[in-house]
Amino acid sequence: MLLKKIVFLISVIFTISIFAQRKKTDTVYIYEKVIVYDTIYLEKAVKLKPANLIFSDFKILAKEINSVQQYIDKEELQEQLKKLSTNKFQFGIQAEIGFKKASWAENISDKNQQFGQNLGIWISKSIINPNFSLMLSANISRWNSTFDLDANKEETYLDGFYFSENNQPLLFQRFNNKHFEYVLQLKAMYEWKNFRPFVGFLANKNIYKMQFLVPENNVLNKLDDFKSNQINFGFSFGLQYRMLNRFLIDLEYQHYKISNLSLKNSSFDFDIFKTNNTFVERKISLGISYFISK
C-alpha cells in the first residue's frame, strides 16, 4: 500500500516537471526604418577670365564680299529671273488709243480715220522656250463717229424707202459710224532684250446701228434699230517693249475683212449694202499694258 502511494507521488511529480519545462510562445514585433535620399543641385556662377582671342577684321570680310560681287553680271541675273517668272501664267490689263479706217465708209464721209479707245485683259504663258510665249486677250473698243446722217435734218446719201424680204416698207432715219467693237485675239510673241515682236489671229464683232421707221399695224410710225452682228476674222502684228519690269508699250496693226455686212433686228432681215458685201477695216493703235501677276 505504501508502495503504491510512493509510485503515484513520483508520477505526479514527473508530470508536473514536464509541463513546467514547456515554453510559451512570445510575440515578436519587427520595425523597418526607411531612409529616402534626394539630390539637390546648386548653380553657382563661375567667373572665367577672358582669353586673349584674336578675331579677323570685319572690314577685310566686307572687302572680300565686294570683290566677289564685282564679277556678277546684273543684266544676266535679271534675265535669269525673268525666265523663271515666265514659266508660269502671267496676266494683266491693257489700255490703247488708235485709228481705224473702213473701206465701206469712204463714199459716205471725207474723214477716213476714225478715232477710238480700247480696254482689255490678257493672259500669257511661255511654251517650248522661255522667250517664246502665247498670249490670249479680250478687248472692247469704242469708236467715235466721223459722220452723222439724219434724214430729218438734211438730205443724206441713204434717204428713201427700203423694202424687207416680205415687201414691208422701211424708211431711213439716221445713221453714224459710232460703235462698239469686241475683239478676241491669240498672239505668238518672242522676247529679245525687252523687245517683243508678235503676230496674231483675231476675231471681232462690230456693233453698227441704223434707225428706220417700220410699220406697226400697217402704219409706218415705229422707230426701230437695225444692228450688225456677224463675226469677222483677221490678223495682226506689232511690237511690244518692256520697261520698268511690269509695263509694256504696245504698237499694233490689225487687218480684217467684213463679209456680208447686214443690219438686222428681231422682226426684219435687211441688207443695205447690196452692191459689195465684202469690206476691209484696218486699224493701228498705241497702248500700254501692266503686269498684274508678279
Image (cartoon, rainbow, N blue to C red):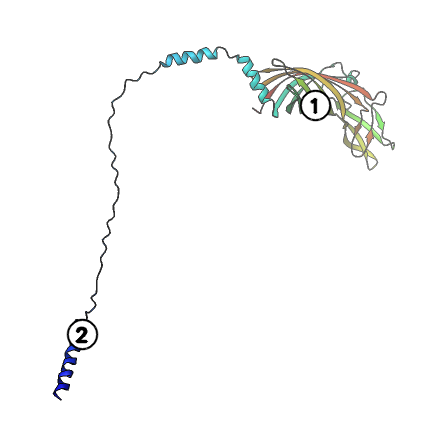
Please state which of residues 251 and 214 is positioned toward the viewer in this rendering: 251
Residue 188 visible in the shown view: yes
Describe residue 88's horizontal placement relative to residue 168 as left or right: left
Q: Quadrant of the C terminus?
A: top right
Q: Quadrant of the N terminus?
A: bottom left
Please state which of residues 71 and 268 is positioned toward the viewer in this rendering: 71
Please state which of residues 229 and 29 is positioned toward the viewer in this rendering: 29
Residue positioned most to the bottom:
1
Say which residue appears at 55% left-offset and 16% top-offset: 78
Q: Tell me: residue 141, above or below residue 76.
A: below
> Measured from the top left, where is residue 7 in percent x and y?
15, 83
Secondary structure under the numbered disc 2 in the rendered image: helix
Secondary structure under the numbered disc 1 in the rendered image: strand
> Measured from the top left, where is residue 263 in percent x and y?
79, 27
Which mark lies nearer to you, 1 or 2?
Answer: 2
Residue 253 visible in the shown view: no
Type of amino acid at the residue the image marks with label 2: Ile
Disc 2 target residue: 18
Disc 1 target residue: 186
> Measured from the top left, where is residue 281 in percent x and y?
76, 18
> Measured from the top left, where is residue 194 in percent x and y?
60, 14
Question: How crowded is the residue under tag 1: few (<14 C-alpha within 10 Å), some, or many (20+)?
Answer: many
Please state which of residues 120 and 177 is positioned toward the viewer in this rendering: 120
Q: In this figure, what is the number of numbered marks?
A: 2
Do the numbered discs 1 and 2 sit on residues whose CB atoms are within 8 Å?
no
Type of amino acid at the residue the image marks with label 1: Leu
